[in-house]
Image (tube, grey):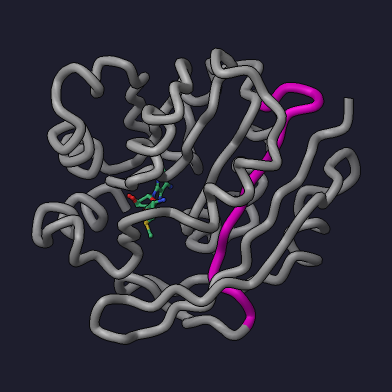
Amino acid sequence: MKEHWNKIYASKEVSRLGWYEEIPTSSIKLLSHCNINKDEPILDIGSGSTTLIDYLIKQRFKNIIAVDISAIALIKLRQRLGKEKASLIKWIIDDITQPVQIQKLHDIAIWHDRALFHFLLEDSQREMYLFTLKKVVKKGGYVIIAVFSLRGAKKCSGLSIKNYDQNMLAEFLGEGFKLLEYFDYTYYMPLGDSKPYTYTLFRREK
Ligand SMILES: C[S@@+](CC[C@H](N)C(=O)[O-])C[C@H]1O[C@@H](n2cnc3c(N)ncnc32)[C@H](O)[C@@H]1O
């Protein structure tokens, strides 16, 4: 997986990737419902080279953690941000299905995942994802998960994915997580291809 993703990020300009967003509007919309302090930790899992990090810096969040399996994706993001802004971020290269560094985190106020979870096809991978999420997200913290919806594509970047709706994600997270918001959002790529996503926002009970 690591090689797969490194190859993709090495071979294309970030703005030509199928999931690139100039402005991550839907994530921003859900983040606006999260009531946290600017110095609380926000974890973006499977960050890639997302512009969400630029947005969070601009909003003056002070404890941003970007995690990805691909070192190249994170290097590209660091380069775009420049030295000064990049130094504000905690960078973690890790695999959510075999987490080492991620497991050491705690008191995460927002767990944000856009388009990583749907790649986890094995029960054991999803179990590890959930185990880790529960270990690091604080009680009262928020979980944002965006995946290809049931109407969405069955593959992304050459890999099979699993499609979800909000009920399936609620069932996956299980008791202790309340679904606060959800919506379907179709992202149109510059060349016109459409990518239907489901966005969800949960809150972990206190
Ligand atoms: C479709 S991209 C989405 C990137 C970013 N979230 C965005 O919205 O622009 C999926 C990302 O998940 C990362 N990824 C895939 N499998 C992973 C894993 N097991 N652990 C951590 N990151 C992973 C990939 O390297 C890639 O950057």
Q: Residue at x 24, y 65 (%)?
A: 17
Seen in the picture, residue 195 relative to 53 is either above or below; the reply is below
Corner quadrant of residue 83: top left
Q: Name the main secondary structure of what is drawn in magenta.
A: strand
Instruction: From the top left corner, tell me how far across and down residue 7 is, in percent.
Output: 15, 56
List x then y, in percent, for residue 20.
Answer: 31, 61
Residue under the image location 33 percent in, 24 percent down: 91
Which residue: 63% across, 18% down? 37
64 displayed left or right of 124 = left
Residue 51 in the image: above or below residue 118? above
Asked whether residue 9 is drawn in magenta, I would say: no
Above-or-below relation of 136 to 79: above
196 vs 12, left or right, is right
Q: Is residue 81 left or right of residue 170?
A: left
Toward the viewer: 124 or 197? 197
Q: Position of residue 169 (x, y in %)?
A: 73, 59
Question: Can residue 162 be seen from the camera position used here?
Answer: no
Does residue 110 appear anywhere in the picture? yes
Q: Residue at x 9, y 60 (%)?
A: 11
Q: Is residue 34 above or below residue 191?
A: above
Total marks placed = 0
Residue 144 magenta-highlighted: yes
Q: Provide residue 44's location: percent of width, then percent of height.
A: 47, 37
Which quadrant would the C terminus be assigned to in this image?
top right
Q: Which residues are magenta?
A: 137-150
